[in-house]
Amino acid sequence: MSFEEMLLFIVKLLAGTGVFLVGVYLLTSNIEQLATGRIKQLFGKTANKRLVNVGIGAASTALIQSSGVTTVLIVGFVNVGVMNLYQATAMIMGANIGTTITAQIAALSAFPITTYIQILVFAGMMLSMVCENDNVQKAGYILAGFGLIFIGLELMSASMKANRDAVQNIFAVVTSPFLLFLIGIFLTALVQSSSVTTSVIIAMSVAGLQIGSGGNEVLFIILGTNIGSCVTALMSSFGAGANARRASLIHLLFNTFGSVIFFTLLMVWPSFMEVTFRRWFDATATQIAMFHTFFNTVCTVLFLPFCSVFVKISQILIKDKKRKKAVETYLDERMLSSPSLALSQIEKEMVLLADISMDAFRKSYRSFSEREPSLIGPTHKLIERANEMSQNIVNYLIRLSAQSKLSEEKDISDIHSNIGDIMRIAEIADNLTKYTRRSIDQNLVFSDSVKTELRKMVEKIEELFTLTKKIIVERDKALLPQIDSTEDEIDAFRKRLIDSHIERLNTGECRPESSSVFINLVSNLERLGDHLTYIAHTVQ
């Protein structure tokens, strides 16, 4: 092969690989965006039943065509405490089964019918250009991506067929199992997808090329791809909590142990490929794809009973950092690629923010009612934390909005509005600390009957807050009439308290200088009820 021929071969091979990767990207990214609702439902069914979690991991990966994305999401859920390590371990095993779907699709390129599948590129792009519906456009891109995968495989196979003898001579000399194993690890780590590496190997088989002597050699590369695929999850766990790093380590341990077992099996059984998959299936591409599925399924069956062992090993290797206070947050960078899942996490963060703001209010009200200035400092710390959290949520929403669908924009807008209302609660808490200082500095005293009425009003606010949290978490619109009724009672409290205060002023029972503090206090309590009601009504 001359230099020009070699250069032309490399250009065509890289071009085919590039088309294939574009197809995988279009397919994966658009399926992921369309399927996030279903993925959210699947992850919401996490349980302690191992087989259920394996099924969830496999189904999620089959939907979005990427074990890397699924594993990153699992690491993210573990990091924010939504999923424990036992559940994550079973799901990771299932994800490894689901990822073999891509190789099975690539194996179809060995059959003549796939030539006609390539027309999907034209059909998909026309569909996405003509239709304005966001979901229909994404469906068009999925079809186009599916077609591009086969065009890319065809280009790779064609370039190899054109230089079959020269290329075969290169791969015929690579017979070392350890070298082939390392090649699989390196190539997969480079492209961060075992499916892509496996699909390239399948394209070689379609071109009639074989690795080594044509025995088990190709399988050693497949084993290496499973370890190389762990790179994505390992990278995503950098800077995350201990449990998130443990989840990515479990992924690595599971694939490594499985690869070592099969590596040993293939070494002691040189005719494994000949007496199994080569006998069962005619097309070499199908043989490779089936081994990929077989390997991951068998490893899952073998290791599933030992989930607790994997968790224990990860806990031994990755210790919890001592004396480091964990910051509780549901926001995770890994979720941004799946807007539906990210929105679910933001809602949890929003409820957490509401709890902190209400804690600040409770402390400030207690400081006022008990004339206790020592509670002002802790109140301000809670307000500062609420401010920091709200800013983080807003920044996260801005980044999420850039890649969300139109149907999700309303949810994002509602959350922006809710964050504003929640921060008004923190501001009301800050106002109450000022009233506390003024009442202490000016020696303002309020009667027991007034304090009793104020306490009843605050109890109604607490009742309203409980209802608001419930409607946000459960999305139960049937609670709205009860919420409106409770808010009306809070308004009635304000009117009654102010009217009673004016009567006491007229009879000389109250000092005039207390009016400003008392009326502002009651008005702030009434405003707090309004903001909680605004939040509740965003569920409509």
Image (cartoon, rainbow, N blue to C red):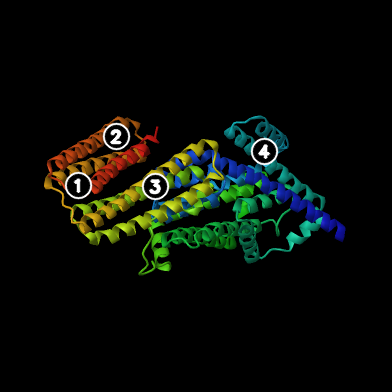
Q: Which mark is residue 268?
A: none
Residue visible at 24% across and 51% down?
A: 365
As measured in the structure, the alpha-carbon distance from the residue carrying label 4 to the one carrying label 2 is 49 Å
Q: Which residue is mark 2?
A: 483
Asked if the residue at tag 3 contacts the one at tag 4, i.e. Cβ–Cβ closer than 8 Å, the answer is no
Q: Position of residue 240 (x, y in %)?
A: 46, 60
Residue 386: give x, y in percent of width and height: 37, 54
Closer to the chain start, of discs 2 and 1, is 2
User: Callout 3 environment at 10 Å: few (<14), some (14 to 19), or many (20+)?
Assistant: many
Give the mark nearest the N terminus, 2 or 3. Answer: 3
Residue kind at label 1, given as amino acid type: Pro
Horizontal side of 321 relative to 442 (left or right) equals right
Q: CA distance from mark 2 to mark 3?
A: 19 Å
Foreground residue among 308 and 237: 237
Q: Residues within 10 Å of mark 4 (few under 14, many from 20)?
A: many
Residue 456's image quarter?
top left
Amino acid at circle 3: Met
Q: Position of residue 106 (x, y in %)?
A: 65, 44
- Report the front residue among 407 and 141: 407
Sequence order check, earlier mark of 1 and 4: 4
- The residue labelled by disc 1 is 512
Q: Secondary structure at mark 2?
A: helix
Q: At numbered mark 4, what does the secondary structure look like: helix, strand or loop?
A: helix
At numbered mark 3, what does the secondary structure look like: helix, strand or loop? helix
Residue lying at 62% horizontally and 38% vertically, measured from the top left: 142
Provide the residue designation for mark 3: 350
